[in-house]
């Protein structure tokens, strides 16, 4: 099949949606499909050969974060030309109501359309206000995918239709076979607690992790919190105070470094405060064999089988996070058992499984 994928968010500052689209495109190409991705990207941004850049972006606050989007007459012309030249059998639009390439591509689409909803939003005035404006375009969608039950609920609540749940994918074997990065290798005397996420996004919960650290250090004085993620590293360092010697802020890291951090850390913490519809980094940590401690969010509870695959603590409760981290470090047998269960369960998120389900939706919509 000839497949066109539309990414609303910029490849200049990649995040979960961009990584999802990149990986599903690579998997589909490996299976023999002809794939092109239309995505915002500035001049000089390194891009895979299958990505068609649609120009620079502006930052807009969206769903508790800052999304880098592009729109306007020039973007519309690029989207229309890409669609005309692509001759696609399937157009797969991600986040179809985002005010960016997603809506523009839907406006001009002439082929069967599949849409994936990634976000989880409740009682959104923006979504309710936007729906009448994009209703005609949304009616072109023949197949609807949601990455989680929370994203599916958003689709049902705001658009009155159902969606098939197909989770985000991970290359499980790459994380499982990764070599621990010696810079961040935890030991019994010097355990490494890993945090991954944009440093300057409050909803990622770095503040909670920092507030939990003193209680961990009181029992495990050699512990170290390694903070990896883009945005505001210098500011984060300036606010550490007495914790500075026990926190390493490394900023943005490569995929290889991320796998090495997860493979070697003693525990991965996900203290997010909300706005999460799935939790791909939890899946990556599970694939790497890292013990996981996460906020009791609905999306995280689903990934962790309500605590069977990793410990859950009450959102925003730093004391509960410190207790969960210490339990993970101290109760070795229970931790090993959870990690073993997680290593088996994570196979359901491997791209070999996830892509089969995506292609099945394509074939249904295209009448193959």
Image (cartoon, rainbow, N blue to C red):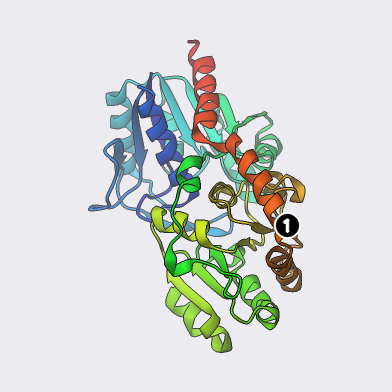
In the displayed structure, 268 sits above or below 243; it is above
* Residue 237 visible somewhere in the drawing: yes
Q: In the picture, which quadrant includes the N terminus?
A: top left
Residue at image coords 69%, 39%: 149
Indicate the position of residue 193 as horizontal and vertical percent values: 58, 68
Please tell me which residue lies in front, 8 or 187. Answer: 187
Residue with the mark numbered 1 = 333
Measured from the top left, where is residue 107 in percent x and y?
A: 43, 30
Residue at horizontal 75%, vertical 51%? 307
Q: Given the current orientation, which residue lies at the most extreme bottom position? A: 242
Asked whether residue 232 is in view, the answer is no
Where 137 sits versus 192, above or below? above
- Residue 39 lies in quadrant: top left
- The residue positioned farthest toward the left in the image shown: 44
| Residue 352 position in % (x across, y down) | 50, 30
| Quarter assignment of residue 7 | top left
| Residue in front for this viewpoint, 162 or 255 | 255
Q: Is residue 293 left or right of residue 194?
A: right
Left or right: 277 with respect to 11? right
Q: Residue at x 55, y 65 (%)?
A: 194
Identify the image quadrant of residue 131. top right
The answer to whether 189 is drawn above or below residue 302 in the figure is below
Between 117 and 337, which is closer to the camera in this rendering? 337
Mark 1 surroundings: few (<14), some (14-19) or many (≥20) residues within 10 A: few
Above or below, 288 relative to 81: below
| Residue that protrudes farthest toward the top in the picture | 368
């Amino acid at each position: 099949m000839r497949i066109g994928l539309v990414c609303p968010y910029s490849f200049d500052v990649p995040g979960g949606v961009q990584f999802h689209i990149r990986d599903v495109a690579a998997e589909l190409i490996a299976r023999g499909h002809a794939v092109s991705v239309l995505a915002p990207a500035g001049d000089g941004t390194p891009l895979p050969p299958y990505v068609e850049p649609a120009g620079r972006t502006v930052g807009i606050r969206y769903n508790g974060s800052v999304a880098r989007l592009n729109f306007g007459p020039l973007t519309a012309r690029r989207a229309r030309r890409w669609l005309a030249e692509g001759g696609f059998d399937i157009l797969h639009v991600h986040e179809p109501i985002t005010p960016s390439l997603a809506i523009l591509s839907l406006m001009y689409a002439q082929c069967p359309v599949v849409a994936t909803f990634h976000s989880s939003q409740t009682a959104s005035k923006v979504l309710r206000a936007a729906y009448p404006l994009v209703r005609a375009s949304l009616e072109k969608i023949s197949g609807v995918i949601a990455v989680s039950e929370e994203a599916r609920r958003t689709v049902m609540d705001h658009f009155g239709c159902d969606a098939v749940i197909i989770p985000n994918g991970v290359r499980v074997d790459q994380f499982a076979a990764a070599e621990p990065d010696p810079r961040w290798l935890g030991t019994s005397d010097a355990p490494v607690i890993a945090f991954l996420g944009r440093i300057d996004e409050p909803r990622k919960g770095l503040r909670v992790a920092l507030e939990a650290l003193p209680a961990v250090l009181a029992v495990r004085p050699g512990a170290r919190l390694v903070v990896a993620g883009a945005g505001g590293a210098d500011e984060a360092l300036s606010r550490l105070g007495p914790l500075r010697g026990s926190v390493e802020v490394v900023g943005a890291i490569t995929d290889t470094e991320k796998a090495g951090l997860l493979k070697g850390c003693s525990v991965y913490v996900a203290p997010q405060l909300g706005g999460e519809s799935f939790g791909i980094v939890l899946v990556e940590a599970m694939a790497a064999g890292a013990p996981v401690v996460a906020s009791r969010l609905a999306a995280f509870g689903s990934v962790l089988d309500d605590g069977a695959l990793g410990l859950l603590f009450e959102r925003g409760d730093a004391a509960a996070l410190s207790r969960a981290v210490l339990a993970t470090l101290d109760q070795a047998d229970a931790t090993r058992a959870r990690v073993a269960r997680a290593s088996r369960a994570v196979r359901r998120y491997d791209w070999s499984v996830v892509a089969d389900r995506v292609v099945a939706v394509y074939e249904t919509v295209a009448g193959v």
